[in-house]
Structure formats: structure tokens, C-alpha cells
Amino acid sequence: MKFWDLIKLANRNLFRNKLRTFLTVAAIFVGSFTLTMTNGIGDGLRSYVETQVKSLEGDAVIFVRRKIEEPKDAPSRDAPSEYKDEAAEAPPTNEIDLSSMLVTLPQMENAVRDIPEVKTVTPSYPIDAEYITLDGVKKYNAYLGMISQGLTQKTEVGTTITGPNQIVLPLGLAKALDPQIENLVGKYVTIGYKNAAKMMQTRSVEVVGVATKGFNTMTTSLVDSQTAASIYSDQRDIMDRGKFGSFTLQLTSADQTKIEALKKKLEEKGFTAETIADRQKRTYDAIGIFKVGMSLVAFIALLAASFGIINTLVIAVLERTKEIGLQKALGMGRGKIFAIFSLESVLIGFWGAVLGIVGAIIIGLIANQVLIRAYGASFEGYTLFVFTIPSILLVMVIVCAIAFAAGVLPAIRASRLNPIESLRYE
């Protein structure tokens, strides 16, 4: 008897008692449905985060800031603070000095002096803008940021920043300036900003691209580091210049071993360094923990359903004892008897998984449409449920594996029946 014949025989045996099989499959359906929906939510979140976070790329760039070190006598973060009378209150001695977290240009240079892998050092210039205009008549509120050297911004049209006096516009602003956003590339827009004396100044910059939507570029226009440095200089008094919350390092190589070694060197000098991949990993880890937590519910349902499979097959062995004895008397070996009952358990899992996956996809697609109608403007590009082939196959494998494990004991019991005693069984 060929393997395909065993499958057909096992499938035919399941439908001898349709109600019992249906109830067992229904229990598997609940678990596979829940598991598929959980994976769909997790994959949807991951897909959305990837499209948002990965709009900014730079494998050979790390972000550096001072390590935050709390005073040794600082109270626990979750401990309540003691009330003190204002008149008797002494200056606090255990609070973090925010000014100590700032970094000067000489300190940046000193931090990387003995690190030959560093190609460029770019301070994170805090800059503000009042408006951006294309024609000088219609002005739009502007939020200004900068792209450090070594970073590239994904764009809908045009390119990322490649030199001085350039700007990448956010998609919403670009459409307001010109619905045909490709027409903006190569044109000059005027940025209006207030200097240190609160007087309005303007600067003309070339539009080189329109950014793909992302967390960093939802409403922010990005300029090159040289333009940012010039605006920063105009907006800061001499006494306020030269202190930065963080800086970026462009490296000569994207080799992960060298990057990890560099991060350790900076840590020894009192700095914390991370890459774009580090930031993404934290987000993906959070999504992974969420998926695991939600999947536990599905596994509990599948575990409960597995007892139903055991019960179904044990009853089937008792009902078919004479039949098994006859099959053995006619020459069917223990291995094929075991295979038939094992396949029956796997097929219960298979049909339950198929129905659960199909049901989850249908409900998920309907939920996605409802979400788009209700919250599309707030979460543009977000799909609540994303069903991928690897996730669907994973659910199928997990469910079938659990079903097989549940059917092992009944299958072993069936294969060990004595043919003579089985034929006498009433």
C-alpha cells in the first residue's frame, strides 16, 4: 500500500463518524485561527515599523551621546519623593545635571582621536524654522531637521542629500507646494527662521527630493549638515553655541565586528553609541514579545484540542479493534497500522489548520478595510493584519505537529493489538 493510499484511507476513516470528527476539527480550528490572527497582527506591526523606520538608512553610521549616570545616592525611580517645606528645602544634590549630558566639539574630537575607523564627526544641530515657501507668497509652517553625513533618506522622487545647501521635503508639504511633486526637484524653496536677535532671516535651498513617509519625515524637512550648522550659528548666542545633545560618526566600514569594538571604546570613555539596526532591534524585540504573549493563548487552545484528538482516536481504536485484527491477519504490519492512525491525527490538525487559516484571513481582510475607513488618515500605510506565506506555513506545521504528537499514543496502541484477541473482541 502506497503512502498516498494510506492518506486516502486515513481521511476516509475520519468521516465514519462525521460529528465526532467535526467537533475535534472545530477545536483545532479555534487554536489555529487564534495563532494565525496573532501572527497577522505581529507581521502587520513589523511591516508598518519597517516602512516607517527604514526610510532612513546608514549601515556605517552610529549615534553617540553621553552615558547617563545617576548619582549613587539617587532614590529609586519608583520610590515616592519626600515632601519638604519650601523655606527649609535645601538644593537637591541627587538630581541629574542635564548640562553634564551636553558634548562640546573638543570633547567629540577627543572621544574619537584614537579611533582610525571614524571618517566624519557631525554634531546634531538643533535648528528651528518658521516657514517654507516656494513662490514667496504662500507660506507653510516648517519643522526643520538635518541629515548627518553618511545617512541616506529614501525618497518618493529625486534623491537623498548629496551636498551643501540642499533639502528633502516631507511628502505632505511637497504636495501642498505642488501636487506634481516631481516638478519640485531642482527648484529652490525659501526657509524663514528667526536668528538669535529674534529677527527673521531667510535662506534659499535646493529641493533634491521628496522623502518617503516615516517617523522621522512625517512633517520634518531635512537639510544637509552644513546648512544646519549655518542656521544653528545664526540662531544661537555666542555663549550658547558649541554644546550638543548628541553627535553621529560616519565610519570607513560597515563591518559589525569593528562597530561593536568601537561602541565598547566609546563606552569606556563615558559615551553610549548605537546604530540604526540597534534602534530597529528594540522595536522588533518588543513586537516579538507581543507575538509570543499572544501566541500563548493560541497554544493553550491547541493543547486543549489535542486532548480531543487523543479521545477521538482512542475511541476509534476501540471501535475498529476487530478491523485492525483482520488487517493484521491479512498481512498488514504494525508500521502501517501506526501510520494510518498517525495520519488520521495529522489530518485532523491539517483540516483544522486550513479552516482556521482561511477564517483568519477572511476576518483579517475585513478588519483591514474597516481600519482603513476609520483610521486611514491617522495611520496611513498601516495594515492591521498582514498574512505572509512563511507565517501561514509555520501555523500549518505547528498545528500538524501538535496533532501528530497527540495521536502517537493511540496509534501505538492500535499497532500493538494482538490480531487473534482483536478478532474475538466484542
Image (spheres, grey):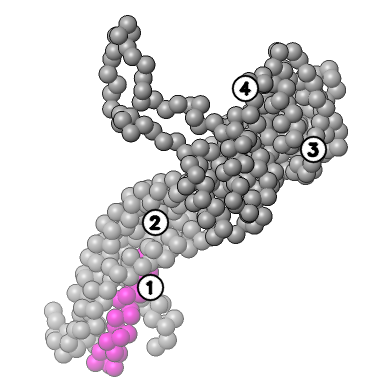
What residue did someone put label 2 on? Answer: 32
Labels 3 & 2 near each other (Cβ < 8 A)? no
290 lies left or right of 258: left
- Residue 346 falls inside the magenta stretch: yes
Observer-nearest of 148 and 279 = 148
> Mark 1 — residue?
11
> Which sits earlier in the primary sequence, circle 2 or circle 4?
2
Q: Which mark is residue 240?
A: 4
Q: Residue at coordinates 65% horizontally, 31% vertically from top-left?
A: 125
Q: Which residues are magenta?
A: 328-349
Q: Residue at x 42, y 86 (%)?
A: 2
Can you tell which of label 3 and label 4 is closer to the viewer?
4
Q: Residue at the spot x=31%, y=30% of the render? A: 73
| Residue type pointed to by label 2 | Ser
Sequence-first disc among 4 and 1: 1
Q: Is residue 56 left or right of residue 38?
A: right
- Under mark 1, the amino acid is Asn
Q: Is residue 402 above or below residue 243?
A: below
Q: Position of residue 10 (x, y in %)?
A: 36, 76
Q: CA gap, disc 1 to disc 3?
A: 70 Å
